[in-house]
Amino acid sequence: MTSCRPLEVHTEDQTPHKWIVSLTEEVFRRFLAQGNPIVHKIFGDGSLFSPLLFGKYFDPSDAFPLWEFESDVLLSNLKSSGKNGVDWFQTDEAYVLKAELPAGVGINTVRIYAENGKIMEISGQWKQQRESKAKDWRSGHWWEHGYVRRLELPEDAEWRKIEAYVNTDMSLELRIPKNNLDCDTDENMAKIPETV
């Protein structure tokens, strides 16, 4: 039986422009080619933090409109290969994202931010940064020390009510409630002119 620990979802990011060094495909392939097993756990096939998660190269520090795609379609290649550690779906009440986190890799550093109802950011540190001139590990070559995935939130997301949990089986679950706007109320229907 797995137990889960709630994570705080921060609504104010103190360093909104922190991902200042983009990760290009060429740089990522060189970085991955180093053969470090921890790097492969974090950024390898099927990981939420892989730049190649969505079938083509996509810098994880750029926001992606995940909810506009069907999970089965976008991740079909990874699901058929058995390498997929990510899933998302929606119910009438919420959007749900489930992702495996690499075991033993900075689990206590996982941070969730919801920025002004537009962007949700999942990030963490997997390696301690040595002394450097950079004030923050995220402003240098961030992928050498941490991981990130930034997602665009849907327009109907109740971003101030996002819930995040980490399970003992090293999986992350995010629940993003939907804004239930009832457009078919009797009051609104009375305003719509009837056509003959």
Image (cartoon, rainbow, N blue to C red):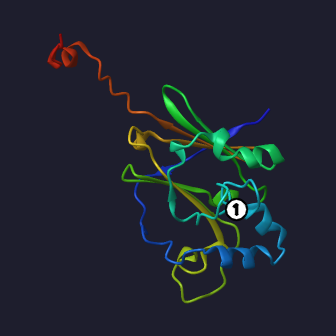
Q: Residue furthest top?
A: 196
Compared to 95, does 60 lie above or below? Answer: below
Is residue 133 visible from the viewing direction of this image?
Answer: yes
Q: Residue 95: x percent and y percent?
A: 53, 36
Q: Secondary structure beneath disc 1?
A: loop
Q: Which residue is mark 1?
A: 106
> Would you identify the image quadrant in which residue 16 lies?
bottom left
Using the image as rendered, state which of residue 64 and residue 171 is in the foreground.
64
Q: Is residue 196 left or right of residue 79?
A: left
Q: Amino acid at mark 1?
A: Gly
Q: Residues within 10 Å of mark 1 (few under 14, many from 20)?
A: some
Q: Is residue 34 left or right of residue 59?
A: right
Q: How many marks?
A: 1
Q: Is residue 113 left or right of residue 100?
A: left
Compared to 35, does 176 lie above or below? Answer: above
The residue at 54%/65% (across/down) is 61
Q: Residue 183: x percent and y percent?
A: 29, 23
Q: Residue furthest front?
A: 196
Using the image as rendered, state which of residue 81 and residue 118 is in the foreground.
81
Picture quarter with the N terminus: top right
Compared to 61, does 116 lie above or below? Answer: above
Q: Residue 132: x percent and y percent?
A: 59, 88
The residue at 74%/53% (across/down) is 46
Using the image as rendered, state which of residue 138 and residue 56 is in the foreground.
56
The residue at 76%/73% (across/down) is 32
Q: Is residue 16 left or right of residue 58?
A: left
Q: Residue 130: x percent and y percent?
A: 66, 84
Picture quarter with the C terminus: top left
